[in-house]
Amino acid sequence: MFQGSMVAIVTPFDSQGRFDEEKYRQLIDFQIENGTDVIVPCGTTGESATLNFEEHDQVIRVCIDQVKKRVPVIAGTGANSTSEAIELSQNAREMGADGLLLVCPYYNRPSQEGLYRHFKAIAEAVKLPQVLYNVPGRTGVDMTADTTVRLAEIDNIVAIKEASGSLTQVSEILARAGEKIDVLSGDDFLTLPMMVCGAKGVISVSANAIPGRVKNMVQDALEGRWEEARRQHLELLEFHTAMFIESSPVPVKTTLWLMGMMEDNIRLPLAPLKPENLEKLKGILKKYGVI
């Protein structure tokens, strides 16, 4: 249902730490003009963990309004409380989102049965296509292939953003449930290997800054131009790695600031890049012609 180059778009803040709606609208247009297939607001890269409920809804609403149905919008509405996730998801549905991105509950460390019941409850409460998001490095829990395969039986659970870093886990999901659930890469540097196995695209951090390049590689892979896709994958590897030189989204927001596209503002507990990492990032961005 959802495939191609999708961006986990950043949430820009002004110097007072407030949501910068004007810059956000400009970033959305930049993405669509450069071929991005899907916009994903309020993911981890959008600093969803530091948005209050009102801001969360506002960011999604502005995104949907600016996109104007030019591409699908998958709203990040996950939470570590099932009832809160349902409330955020219902709000997104009412605002006109095309789908939902639902991260595994963080901090709680639920069992696999708890994960299954959490996602099943959201799917039953909100009839929108749902993309699960497995990112154990952030949440403290890894949703196993067994659990994903169980959830694939639910009609409106249509995809999983896999960021476990395990190609074995990705391959097992595709082998057992590939006709029932799409797999999307959650790690830019693993997008091509995952697509070789059958993944349908990426929800990308790097695409915030280089949407056209990410789109080209993903499109080549989707259309079977594997040699060209491999060349681009290897060419972009250092850039992808640089976007995680410190905790995301700090490096990518710094990149967009250096590109003159937004202010370099993040919310605590995130902190600005260390000076030595800022200099290293600048060198890599100059190498790629981004600045």
Image: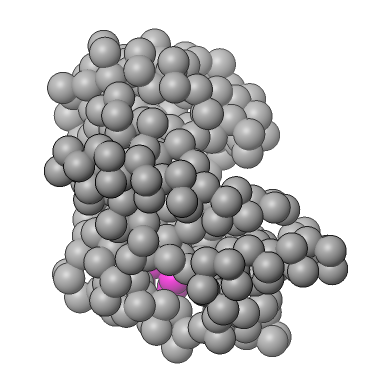
Location of residue 47 (image quadrant): bottom right
Q: Magenta part mainly helix, strand or loop?
A: helix
- In the rendered image, residue 201, in percent from the top left (x then y), is placed at 30, 43
Magenta region: which residues? 57-61
Where the N terminus falls, by quadrant? Answer: top left
* Residue 234, magenta (yes or no): no
> How many numbered marks are there?
0
Location of residue 64 (image quadrant): bottom left
User: Closer to the camera, 186 or 21?
Assistant: 186
* Residue 60, magenta (yes or no): yes
Where the C terminus falls, by quadrant? Answer: bottom right
- At a point 25% along the width and 38% down the height, the residue shown is 226
- At a point 29% along the width and 29% down the height, the residue shown is 196
User: Colour scheme in the image?
Assistant: one colour
Is 15 left, or right, of 234 in this rendering? right
- At a point 56% along the width and 16% down the height, the residue shown is 111
- In the rendered image, residue 171, in percent from the top left (x then y), is placed at 35, 18
Establish if 263 lies above or below 109. below
Establish if 87 lies above or below 120. below
- At a point 31% along the width and 51% down the height, the residue shown is 217
User: Closer to the camera, 220 or 83?
Assistant: 220
Residue reaching furthest right?
275
